[in-house]
Image (spheres, rainbow, N blue to C red):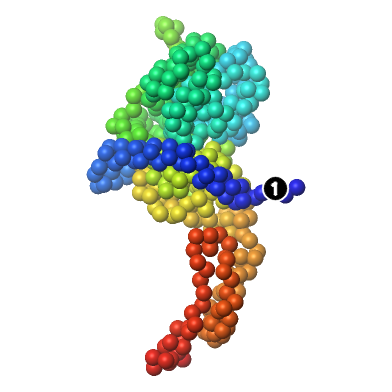
Amino acid sequence: MNVPGPMTALRARVREALGKAPVRRNFRAAMDGIRAKRADALPDATDFAQRRARTAAIRARALARLPELLERLEQRLEANGIRVHWAEDAAQANAIVLDLLRQAGARSVIKGKSMVSEEIGLNDVLGEAGIAVVESDLGEYIVQLAGEPPSHIVAPAIHKNRHEVATLFQAHHPQREATEDIEGLTAEARQVLRARFAQADAGISGVNFLVAETGTLVLVENEGNGRLSTSAPPLHIAITGIEKVIERLDELPPLLDLLTRSATGQPITTYVNFISGPRRADELDGPREVHLVLLDNGRARIHADPLFADTLRCIRCGACINHCPVYVQVGGHAYGSVYPGPIGALLEPQRLGLEAGGSLTSACTLCGACGDVCPVAIPLPGLINQLRAEGVEPRTDSPLPDAGRLRHRGEALLWRLWAAIYAHPRRYRWLARLLTALRRLAPRRLGAWTRWREAPRPAARDLHRLAREAGFSDE
């Protein structure tokens, strides 16, 4: 049986996405609105440049001292009563979470938004173990009911409109009155989820930032569901990547300021949660146990590569996705990866390997929009282009998995032939005369290039002949 390669699979998903006119309209309307809000929130280009220089420096300093800050973070968290667990890969992270839940006798979990949990496939693992998981973020809850992965790292259900959500809710909540009103749909989800918060044996969340100085987990959200997920159940398990650490608490405000403005165009988010330990003896609410799972899953390797270490500056705001002309046309599911858009085209090939994820770099026009809006100044276009090069002609000491595996022998042979001809004037002139003489035999179809264009044809008279006829020598 012939299994389609990564590039073939990407093209198939893109064709499928382009054929879904309603979904494309949903994306177009949503992206236009988000970009307009972001422009209103950051109207001054000079002011934005100054702000992001500061946030970029904060993230760069943290990455430069990553091992030291992680050790300091662990010490502070343990002193605060938060247990720290280290996971090298997805399998180990899932095993740790599953073991913690089994030790607590947990059979139901309420889960806040977490891209890292999507990365490791946590919901599927817990479901197979007989533990019921309910997403509490409205967008995540919608795609969970639809049986779909998130299509955006900030707005998971951005590809759906209110009519589609209403149909979905009616199918899963038939006892409730049908409505297509957005406030009514939100209220319906809130009522359904409220009982889940009270009944859940454990809560799982992601983390936006880890403060090494104080041993604090910082969660940013707009709905309040994250706060309930981390405080209502008796057990809270947080999971995040090792790159989320910053050194000091006073470095947090600049990051929060640009995170919310870049993500949703808000001057400040509705909820910023600081978690520094489990419930104390004199407190009435909060979890009795708090655990943090710190995931590597290729991040240490990325951090050790000076060429691509800046990838880990990302604060998951989604601004690069919102401004990407490719994403706006095809949406997140077309990428076939956990992280879509420009950050996905940069991160996933490094995480999964170039053979599996390298084709994502072709889903980029290198227009530069993502680099212009990134709040931590990641040079996304340049790094994506470098990944393309690594796929076909890697560095001698490239640490990237499957570096060079995207090189096609036939294509490489054609380029060597091209170089051999164009490096010698006589060979070039001979070929030009031959192509001119045989111009009527030029093919009309040249694969995908001629799907929307006419095939180029050699001119009846080449430039050298025109120059000679005009009295100029070509010698």
Query: Which of the 4 image quadrants contains residue 436?
Result: bottom right
> Dot 1 lies on which element?
loop
| Residue tagged 1 | 3
Residue type (three-letter) at the residue carrying disc 1: Val
Query: Which of the 4 image quadrants contains residue 297?
Result: top right
171 or 404, nearer to the observer: 171
Circle 1 Cα neighbour tier, 10 Å, few/some/many (<14 / 14–19 / ≥20):
few
462 is higher (above) or lower (below) than 247: below
Question: Residue drawn at (70%, 47%), measured in percent from left and top?
Answer: 3
User: Would residue 285 be found to the left or right of residue 445 on screen?
Assistant: left
Give the image location of residue 56, x and y in percent.
36, 43
Q: How many marks?
A: 1
Question: Residue drawn at (55%, 40%), measured in percent from left and top?
Answer: 337
Give the image location of residue 144, x and y in percent.
54, 26
80 or 265, nearer to the observer: 265
Is residue 231 at least partly visible in the picture? no
Is residue 322 at least partly visible in the picture? yes
Give the image location of residue 77, x and y in percent.
47, 23
108 is higher (above) or lower (below) than 472: above
436 or 263, nearer to the observer: 436
31 is higher (above) or lower (below) than 431: above
Question: Residue drawn at (49%, 82%), measured in percent from left and top?
Answer: 460
71 or 100, nearer to the observer: 100
Give the image location of residue 376, x and y in percent.
37, 43
Question: Residue drawn at (39%, 27%), measured in percent from left and top?
Answer: 220
145 is higher (above) or lower (below) than 353: above
